[in-house]
Image (cartoon, rainbow, N blue to C red):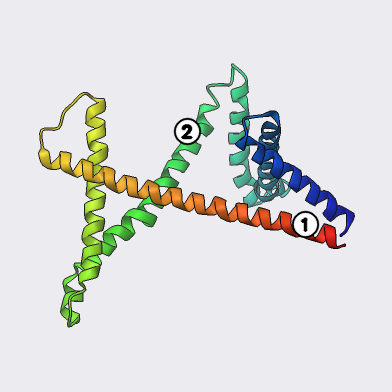
Amino acid sequence: MSPSDLILGIVGLTLTVMVFSYLIKDNVFFGIALYLLVGVSAGFATLLIIRSVILPMLVRPLTQAGTQAFYLALVPLVLSVLLIMMFFKRGSRMGRIPLAFLTGVMAAMALMGISRGTLAPQILSIFYWFSPGLVADSSAIHWWGMVEAIAILIGVVAVLCFFRERQNKMKLKESKTPVLVGLSKLGQVFLGITFGALFVGILSSALIALISNLSTIVEFFSTLLTG
């Protein structure tokens, strides 16, 4: 085993023990490990942004004076300067301009992702299984596909009714329609199933990472003891 592998193994083992010390109680060793994780993650994200965004998309185009890339790079440069001015009281109002652009772009990307990645496939799936052409071209009706389409339709409507009822409760309004109340309760069930599935996915990912880390520690000790 090389000295670098030995040092990395000892550091990884120490950090693992520091994290597992949280099972006893919240202590300073767990805090140090947590701060190291946040600091390393922030440093890695900053380095990645500098190498993948700032240098190729801002600094390099600014060195090519007179080109189209140069004039396009002036836009993010001006917005970045206005954003930095928010640290000063006199320029705080000017910093709202890049924040407005950033909020608008993020909202548009989120809406586009939701519509194209979630809403549109669900609607197309419902229309597909209820399509008259599909029923006419096939000798047997795809009952399971129709059941899935109905479940998707009911789930979407029930979740929307649930959020509608929550909004009415926040406004101190009571719904007088039993159907909407029932659909809102059904939507709560769908949300519970969704969050349960997400929790299971996160827990399984954490277990996979734990098993991988433990196997690395076992391999480190076996390599250290055997030579």
Where the N terminus falls, by quadrant? bottom right
What residue is pinned by disc 2? 100
Residue 41 falls left or right of residue 140: right
- Measuring 20% from the left and 81% from the top, which residue is drawn there? 138
- Where residue 59 appears, as percent x and y from the top left, is 71, 45
What residue is pinned by disc 1? 220
Identify the element where label 1 is drawn: helix
Front: mark 1 or 2: 1
Q: What's the residue type where badge 1 is placed?
A: Phe
**Crowd tier of the residue under label 2, counting other residues whose Cα lies within 10 Å: few below 14, some 14–19, many 20 or above:** few
Residue 35 falls left or right of residue 1: left
Where the C terminus falls, by quadrant? bottom right
Residue 165 falls left or right of residue 85: left
Residue 164 visible, this angle? yes
Outermost residue on the top side: it is 89
- Measuring 72% from the left and 42% from the top, which residue is drawn there? 15
- Measuring 70% from the left and 42% from the top, which residue is drawn there? 17
Q: Answer with mark 1 or mark 2, whichever residue precedes in sequence.
A: 2
- Measuring 21% from the left and 41% from the top, which residue is drawn there? 184
